[in-house]
């Protein structure tokens, strides 16, 4: 399809394990965003990529979180040593450029046991 | 830290009723976006408002940006079950960050 694709759609893992979440943006979109949404809540902004660069990483909740983007396309969000409070839906969005309309994927639902 | 407060937090109404939800802040914004999110899906952009006092209409939905560009409202006329969802407002903050509001969860009963 032509939309933003995220994988896996669901991930259940044990506390302390590392997880990697993937986002495939819409082709041609230079801007890519990651968000976290706890149950029934609004979205918490994590990071923005312009091309392969993230100008500001201060939105990442802790140093256990990291993100990268390669080839101006696919992005991965990695959480190391997962904690139960990391349980949430992680959403990815892309847009043509910064502050243009964002198109969201359906998210990865992460559950930490 | 900028905060976008949305009200009401929850709203349950009968089909055919009108409703208004609000997005408020103490900060001034250059633009504001409204999204609707359905369960299990990502948010979908409804509208972007840019000019203070601007009113935009999308079928039965009317969006208004406050004159001072600190607040916005979304009015739905003759609500339908298909309007059910989480309504979120969002603004850009500082350099390369977005802030989303706390959300209004709307349920329209048939």
Image (cartoon, rainbow, N blue to C red):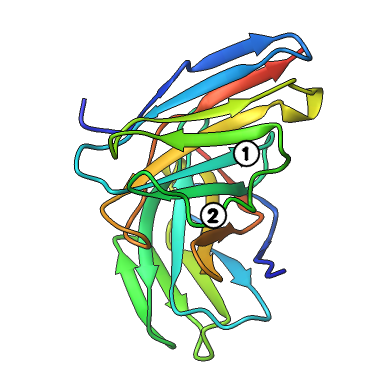
Check disc 2 and report its element: helix, strand or loop.
strand
Residue at 37%, 67% (x, y): give it.
B48
Residue A110 image point, x, y percent: 63, 21
Of residues A73 and B99, which is closer to you in this image? Answer: A73
Residue at 68%, 23% (x, y): give it.
A80
Where does the C terminus of chain A fall, quadrant-wise? top right
Residue A36 image point, x, y percent: 61, 39
Kindly give the residue lying farthest to the bottom in the view shown.
B67
Of residues B57 and A113, which is closer to you in this image? Answer: A113
Residue at 33%, 73% (x, y): give it.
B56
Spatial CA distance of label 1 from label 2 is 12 Å
Horizontal side of A11 relative to B3 (left or right) equals left
Q: Residues within 10 Å of mark 2 (few under 14, many from 20)?
A: many
Horizontal side of B19 relative to A63 (left or right) equals left
Nearest-to-viewer mark from 1 and 2: 1
Residue A108 image point, x, y percent: 52, 24
Q: Which residue is mark 1?
A: A37
Of residues B37 and A113, which is closer to you in this image? Answer: A113
Of residues A23 and B35, which is closer to you in this image? Answer: A23
Q: Residues within 10 Å of mark 1 (few under 14, many from 20)?
A: some
In the rendered image, residues at marks 1 and 2 fall on the same chain: no
Q: Which residue is mark 2?
A: B88
């Amino acid at each position: 399809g032509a939309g933003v694709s995220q994988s896996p759609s669901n991930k259940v893992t044990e506390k302390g394990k590392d997880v990697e979440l993937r986002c495939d943006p819409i082709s041609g979109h230079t801007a890519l965003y990651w968000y976290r949404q706890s149950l029934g809540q609004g979205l918490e902004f994590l990071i923005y990529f312009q091309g392969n660069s993230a100008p500001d990483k201060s939105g990442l909740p802790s140093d256990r979180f990291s993100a990268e983007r390669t080839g101006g396309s696919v992005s991965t969000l990695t959480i190391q040593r997962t904690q139960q409070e990391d349980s949430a839906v992680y959403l990815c969005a892309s847009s043509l450029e910064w502050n243009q309309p964002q198109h969201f994927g359906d998210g990865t639902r992460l559950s930490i046991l | 830290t900028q905060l976008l407060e949305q009200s009401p937090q929850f709203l349950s109404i009968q089909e055919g009723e009108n409703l208004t939800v609000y997005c408020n802040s103490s900060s001034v914004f250059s633009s504001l976006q409204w999204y609707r999110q359905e369960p299990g899906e990502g948010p979908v952009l409804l509208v972007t408002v840019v000019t203070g006092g601007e009113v935009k209409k999308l079928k039965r939905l009317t969006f208004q940006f406050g004159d001072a560009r600190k607040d916005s409202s979304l009015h739905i006329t003759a609500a339908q079950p298909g309007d059910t969802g989480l309504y979120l407002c969002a603004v850009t903050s500082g350099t390369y960050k977005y802030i989303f509001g706390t959300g209004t969860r709307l349920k329209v009963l048939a």
